[in-house]
Image (cartoon, rainbow, N blue to C red):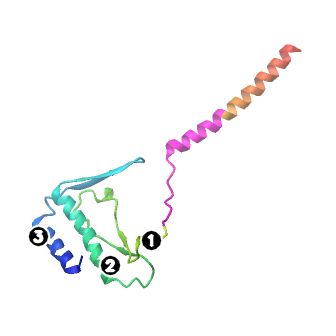
């Protein structure tokens, strides 16, 4: 798709859909996330990605393989819940990019479960030793 075609789509979305009517939000938990919005909100959100696509041809990528594009999501109420504060853009093809491993943050529930298992194991060992000593004292 050429930049002229992208410009037409971007301008059409900006002319036909108002930021004041737009609704977009997202929710995430440790299992999944989802976006929600009305037609205006979803189109205006997608419009920022189209602008990022146009930006790829403008950049020289002198400083590295990826550069940051800062989209304008100021129209979103509750911008803190927006999952994309910026977009990393590149000219590389998918086969040329080494996948980055995303380290998954350990939730407090799994940390607590691990601590509980260790504490339970310690109690089992202590009570086993106490039980065996009591048993041997009882036999003798």
Of the two numbered discs 2 and 1 in the rendering, the one whose residue sits closer to the viewer? 1
Confirm whether residue 96 shows in the render. yes
Relative placement, left or right, of 87 versus 77 is right
Confirm whether residue 74 shows in the render. no
Residue closest to the far left: 16
Residue under numbered circle 1:
95
In magenta, the rendered stretch is 99-120
Is-magenta flag for residue 105?
A: yes
Residue 57: % across, % down: 31, 81
Relative placement, left or right, of 121 versus 35 is right
Measuring 49% from the left and 47% from the top, which residue is drawn there? 107
Q: Nearer the viewer, residue 44 or 138?
A: 44
Q: Nearer the viewer, residue 136 or 51?
A: 51
Residue 62: % across, % down: 42, 85
Is the C-beta separation of discs 2 and 3 under 8 Å?
Answer: no
Q: Residues within 10 Å of mark 1 (few under 14, many from 20)?
A: few
Q: Quadrant of residue 74?
A: bottom left
Label number found at residue 15: 3
Is the C-beta separation of discs 1 and 3 under 8 Å?
Answer: no
Of the two numbered discs 2 and 3 in the rendering, the one whose residue sits closer to the viewer? 2
Measuring 15% from the left and 68% from the top, which residue is drawn there? 13
Residue under numbered circle 2:
56
Q: Residues within 10 Å of mark 3 (few under 14, many from 20)?
A: few
């Amino acid at each position: 798709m050429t930049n002229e075609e992208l410009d037409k789509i971007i301008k059409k979305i900006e002319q036909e859909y108002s930021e004041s009517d737009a609704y977009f939000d997202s929710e995430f938990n440790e299992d999944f996330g989802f976006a929600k919005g009305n037609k205006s909100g979803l189109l205006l959100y997608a419009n920022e990605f189209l602008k990022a696509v146009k930006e790829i041809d403008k950049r020289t990528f002198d400083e590295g393989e990826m550069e940051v594009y800062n989209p304008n999501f100021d129209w979103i109420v509750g911008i803190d819940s927006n999952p994309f504060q910026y977009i990393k853009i590149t000219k590389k093809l998918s086969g040329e990019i080494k996948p980055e491993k995303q380290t998954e943050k350990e939730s407090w529930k799994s940390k607590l479960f691990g601590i509980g298992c260790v504490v339970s194991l310690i109690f089992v060992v202590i009570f086993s030793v106490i039980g065996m000593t009591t048993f041997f004292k009882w036999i003798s």
